[in-house]
Amino acid sequence: MYYIIYNGQKFGPMPAEELVKYGLNPESEVWTEGMANWMKAFEVAELAPYLSRPMSAPVPPQAQYGYQNNYNNNYNGGQNGYPAPSNNNAGEKKIIFAVLAFLFGYLGVQYFYIGKIGGGIICLLLSLVTCGAWDLLIFIQAIIVLTMKDEDFDRKFINSNSMMPLF
């Protein structure tokens, strides 16, 4: 899954073939997991097949293709003035999320913390409807979150379009 800078904004994650819809050209700045910094598209071997195709005019991406700019804005400086993504904050968010789930999971506070307001409300309602039985599932979720990799947490909870990711 790739991120691309299009009209000065970062978009992604998306499969490599979708980058063409965002005006991919050899000079486009792209990033994917495993890269230390943003790179020009022509420097990424996997993108070569998409650069040799005739390109159509770029279209406004968010409205037509449904991709949102859910790029993690916590980053360090990268090359050419563009930021390089950083997972320094991922571990901290993961631990805070798990602690909130342990302590206040029945209230859905952990979802409010990561910006999933709908998930927090649903969690609260499920706790009320199940007379607290929902708390056991949230307790299990907290343990699983603590044992998962930071990248998996980011992908499943932070960068997910799901309103209420569980595991």
Image (tube, rainbow, N blue to C red):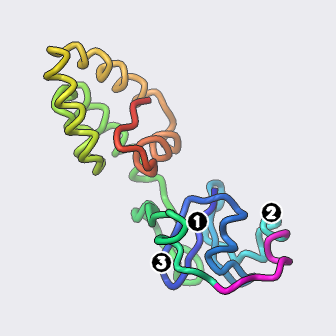
Span shown in magenta: 49-57
- Determine whether 134 is above or below 50 in the image: above
Name the residue at 46% across, 67% down. Answer: 76
Residue 46's tag is 2
Q: Which of 29 and 68 lies nearest the eye of the viewer?
A: 68
| Number of other residues with Cα within 10 Å of mark 3, as a class: few under 14, some 14 to 19, many 20 or more | few
Q: Assess whether mark 2 and mark 1 are in contact (beta carbons under 8 angstroms).
A: no
* Residue 96 drawn in magenta: no
Name the residue at 82% across, 82% down. Answer: 54
Earlier along the polypeptide chain: callout 1 or callout 2? Answer: 1
Q: What residue type is labelled 3?
A: Gln
Task: Calculate the distance from the C-alpha at mark 3 to the C-alpha at mark 1.
Answer: 10 Å
Secondary structure, mark 3, is strand
Secondary structure, mark 1, is strand
Point out the image quarter for the N terminus. Answer: bottom right
Q: In which quarter of the image is residue 123?
A: top left
* Residue 51 drawn in magenta: yes
Q: Which of 105 and 82 lies nearest the eye of the viewer?
A: 105
Q: In which quarter of the image is residue 27?
A: bottom right
Name the residue at 69% across, 78% down. Answer: 24
| Number of other residues with Cα within 10 Å of mark 2, as a class: few under 14, some 14 to 19, many 20 or more | few
| Number of other residues with Cα within 10 Å of mark 1, as a class: few under 14, some 14 to 19, many 20 or more | many
The residue to which callout 1 is attached is 3
Q: Assess whether mark 3 and mark 2 are in contact (beta carbons under 8 angstroms).
A: no
Point out the image quarter for the C terminus. Answer: top left
Residue 9's tag is 3
Earlier along the polypeptide chain: callout 2 or callout 3? Answer: 3
**Magenta stretch: helix, strand or loop mostly:** loop
Q: Which amino acid does label 1 sit on?
A: Tyr
